[in-house]
Image (spheres, rainbow, N blue to C red):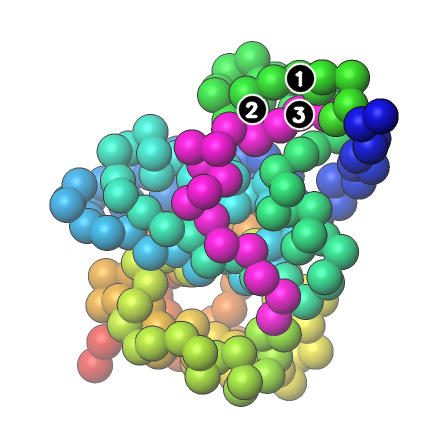
Amino acid sequence: MARRVKIPMLHTSIFFREPEMWAKLEKLIMQRYSKYTKFQVLDLGCSWGAEAYSLAYTLHKLGYNYHITAVDQNPEVVNYASKGVFKFDSNLRRVYRETDIFIQEGDGVIQGFVVNDVYRQKISFSVADITTSTFWKTLRRNTFHLVVIRYVLIHIPTEKIPFILDNIYQILTPQGLLFLGRSEKIEKYSSNFKKIERGIYEPLRY
């Protein structure tokens, strides 16, 4: 007998959260990077993986060869994110109708929406604590074209935020982009970034 898969509720990870920001991000990516770029993304605090899969869909649609490294400190959510199965809700039904992120709407065993392998195979999910130097030592300088950390910094002790932003600065490419939530600002924590749009920054290279 097939084993039923338990599906979690989405919490802090939402598909295409703040759609107008995704439109701006797409435009900036196309302006800065040719389609020959092997596009590298780092998703910090990926939670259940909805935004990581949104990024995969976006970059695929734009025609980029890409890879997404997605991390979270919670092993449970990383495990679910890597499976690519999401609980039914009205928002996901819309995503199912309007995109090809999901290949099926449950099958009697899996009670939820199943992510297309085209996107799932382009994401590496892993457990990591971004407040520690151990994590950042595993990453190379000037490697990532986009770093996503949306509504994560608000959950991190303020004394740790400058450390995280400094490391993000080190790993971004010169034309790299930092993608935050629309209402998030980082000016008081770091002078190494310039705001392009609300919630979108670029590194300053002196």
The x and y percentages for residue 187 are 47, 72
SS label for mark 2: strand
Residue 136 seen in this snapshot:
yes
User: Which residues, given as a range, are shown in magenta?
Assistant: 112-128
Q: Residue at x 71, y 17 (%)?
A: 107
Badge 3 or badge 2: first in the primary sequence? 2
Q: CA distance from mark 3 to mark 2?
A: 6 Å
Q: Which mark is residue 113?
A: 3
Q: Are marks 3 and 1 in contact (CB under 8 Å)?
A: yes
Name the residue tied to disc 1: 105
Where residue 183 appears, x then y in whole percent?
58, 52
- Side of 163 where 174 appears, left or right: left
Q: Residue 198: in sight, yes or no? A: no
Q: Amino acid at mark 1?
A: Glu
- Between 46 and 203, the residue placed more toward the observer is 46
- Residue 138's place in the image compared with 19, above or below, is below
Q: Is residue 196 above or below residue 162?
A: above
Q: Say which residue label 2 marks.
A: 102
